[in-house]
Image (cartoon, rainbow, N blue to C red):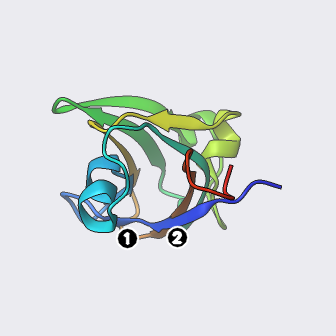
Amino acid sequence: MQTLIPVPAYSGKSNNEIVLLDPARLADWHCVDRDSPKVLCKTTIYGNHAAGWSLYLHENGCYEWLIGSDITGNSSGALDVISLLGHNLCLMPWQKLIFCSEDGACTAISYIRLSGLSGLD
């Protein structure tokens, strides 16, 4: 069994946006190595997703759409976008993973794997 580190989401630029993972903020706030990629293994997003949702990669001021409710049809309960993608995501230090819910506020926690920590590999 792998050991994962929980990372709470935080509010984004609008009230319907949360940042699931921001490697640069992890480095600044929690003394995590800035230069290494972060592997996102699982998410748990709570809220009413019936109005729709989307997952974006934010890089260099641009938003790249990854997946959304129009593809998956998933609209209620806890949502794990990583299982919907079918694979883990590796984010580089300059990237952010953004979740947008059309219905407003939601909460989330993501689980990352950090390489190089003794006993966690």
Task: Name the one closer to the observer, 108 or 39.
Answer: 39
Quadrant placement of the N terminus: bottom right
Q: Name the residue under label 2.
A: 47
Q: In this view, does 19 lie above or below 37?
A: below
Residues under labels 2 and 1: Cα distance?
Answer: 7 Å
Residue, x 37% and y 34% (percent of image)? Answer: 92
Q: How crowded is mark 2: few (under 14 residues within 10 Å), some or many (20 or more)?
A: some
Asked whether, in this view, residue 25 is left or right of residue 70, the answer is: left
Q: Residue 8, how many percent across, how many down? A: 44, 69
The image quarter containing residue 95 is top left
Mark 1 nearby-residue class (10 Å; few <14, some 14–19, many ≥20): some
Of residues 115 and 17, which is closer to you in this image? Answer: 115
Whether the residues at callouts 2 and 1 have beta carbons within 8 Å, the answer is yes
Q: As displayed, is residue 30 above or below residue 115?
A: below
Q: In this view, does 107 lie to the left or right of 30?
A: right
Hey, what amino acid is under mark 1?
A: Ala
Amino acid identity at mark 2: Gly
Where residue 50 sits, quadrant-wise, is bottom right
Q: What element carries label 1?
A: loop
Give me the disc on residue 105: 1
Q: For the point 71% across and 34% down, which residue is it?
A: 86
